[in-house]
Image (cartoon, rainbow, N blue to C red):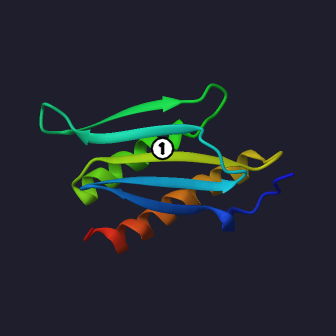
Amino acid sequence: MHEYNPEDIVISAVPIGRDVMLIVTGGAAHIGAVSTAYVGPSGEFEVQTSEVPGHKEHTISEELALKAARILDRTVTVAMGIHYDDISKEEIIDIIAIVHGKMDDFLRMKSKL
């Protein structure tokens, strides 16, 4: 059982040359979705996402990858997997807010990468 405990949500960074991979996990860690944001041919940031069927992390990973890529001015991949057993809609809303808050804190600290 993975009881609801959003305090265990973590963001880890893995530098890959100039780029960075951000790994967002909590509860039963896994890969639910992967989003990569990069500068496209138009000069604007674009994102591509791959999701594992039955998982919902893509609803957050895409936005996080775009935000991080724009702030860090580099290609960013976000791999995300958070799972808690039997959580409510309110707890899901809390998790989304916590993940965004942790990403904002991370980006403030790492904007000079």
Q: Residue at x 13, y 31 (%)?
A: 41
Position above or below: 79 against 27: above
21 vs 44, left or right, is right
Q: Position of residue 94 (x, y in %)?
A: 65, 57
Q: Residue at x 61, y 36 (%)?
A: 56
9 vs 107, left or right, is right
Q: Residue at x 58, y 52 (%)?
A: 96
Q: In the rendered structure, which amino acid carries the disc numbered 1?
A: Ser
Farthest-out residue, top: 53
Q: Nearer the viewer, residue 56 or 2?
A: 2
Q: Which residue carries the number 1 mark?
A: 61
Quadrant of residue 95 in the image? Answer: bottom right
Position above or below: 92 against 33: below
Quadrant of residue 68 in the image? Answer: bottom left
Position above or below: 16 against 60: below
Q: Position of residue 1 (x, y in %)?
A: 87, 51
Q: Nearer the viewer, residue 68 or 90?
A: 68
Q: Position of residue 12 (x, y in %)?
A: 49, 62
Q: Residue at x 81, y 47 (%)?
A: 85
Q: Position of residue 18 (x, y in %)?
A: 24, 56
Classify mark 1: helix, strand or loop.
helix
28 vs 25, left or right, is right
